[in-house]
Image: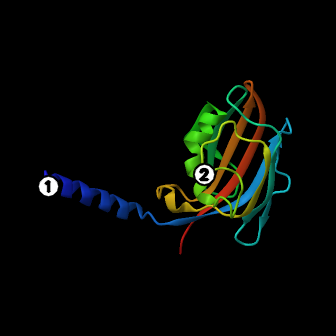
Amino acid sequence: MFKLSLCLLFLVFAVGLCFNYKPYTVSIVSFNQSNETGVFDTTTLRLIGRERLVNGTVELKEDMDDSHWSFAGELYFNPTENNNFKRMAFNIPLTPICKAFKNYRKYFSKHAEYGKQTNFPMHMDVCPVPKGTYYLKNIHLNSDNFPLMLQRGYMLGQGLFYYDGVHVGTYSICTILEDVD
């Protein structure tokens, strides 16, 4: 049994060397919104400096609960700058908003420290997602917990919001993944 475990460990290590997985950085390229309902207002968000840090405020004009609101997420990838994004297999199926917040907040809460970089309650489960004005200060994406196997290039993430099953807004963030030198 020990020999088998050792062989598997060696095989995993060898495969990693063959594919040359390296750490990478993630930088935000752009942020866009298509908000038909006006429930979210992200118009004051800006990308600042060479680091492309997110700064500004987001206003949520009503509480979001499972009785009306749902969320879906999609990821697209483009290895070049030709704006020809291909949909990836990773997505978030249409999910009630509170369940989506509870299931996926752990992936986003590591990028902003509550009380220092944001006042949005990403560090705890809340339902309904409370209305209010939330600040974002010097937010950057940290790739430490991202898989090493992601292809380098441009990645587009889209969050789609639905009210009573009707699509009412899309929020898109475009990032670039680059190897660390």
Viewer-side residue, 61 vs 41? 61
Rendering colour mode:
rainbow
User: In this rendering, would 51 be left or right of 144?
Assistant: right
The spot of residue 101 in percent (x, y) is 62, 41
Q: Are marks 2 and 1 in contact (CB under 8 Å)?
A: no
- Between disc 2 and disc 1, the foreground one is 2
Which disc, if any, is residue 179?
A: none
User: In this rendering, would 133 be left or right of 110?
Assistant: right
Nearest to N terminus: mark 2 or mark 1: 1
Residue name at image x 81 percent, y 42 percent: 34
The spot of residue 125 in percent (x, y) is 60, 43
Local SS, label 2: loop
The spot of residue 8 in percent (x, y) is 24, 54
Q: Neighbour class for label 2 at 10 Å: few (<14), some, many (≥20)? A: some
Q: CA distance from mark 2 to mark 1?
A: 41 Å
The spot of residue 164 in percent (x, y) is 74, 24
Residue located beneath label 2 in the image: 123
Q: Neighbour class for label 1 at 10 Å: few (<14), some, many (≥20)? A: few
Amino acid type at circle 1 is Phe
Residue located beneath label 1 in the image: 2
Q: Quadrant of residue 57?
A: bottom right
Residue name at image x 51 percent, y 62 percent: 144
Local SS, label 1: helix
Viewer-side residue, 42 vs 74? 42
Amino acid type at circle 2 is His
Residue name at image x 31 percent, y 57 percent: 12
Q: Is residue 45 above or below residue 73?
A: below
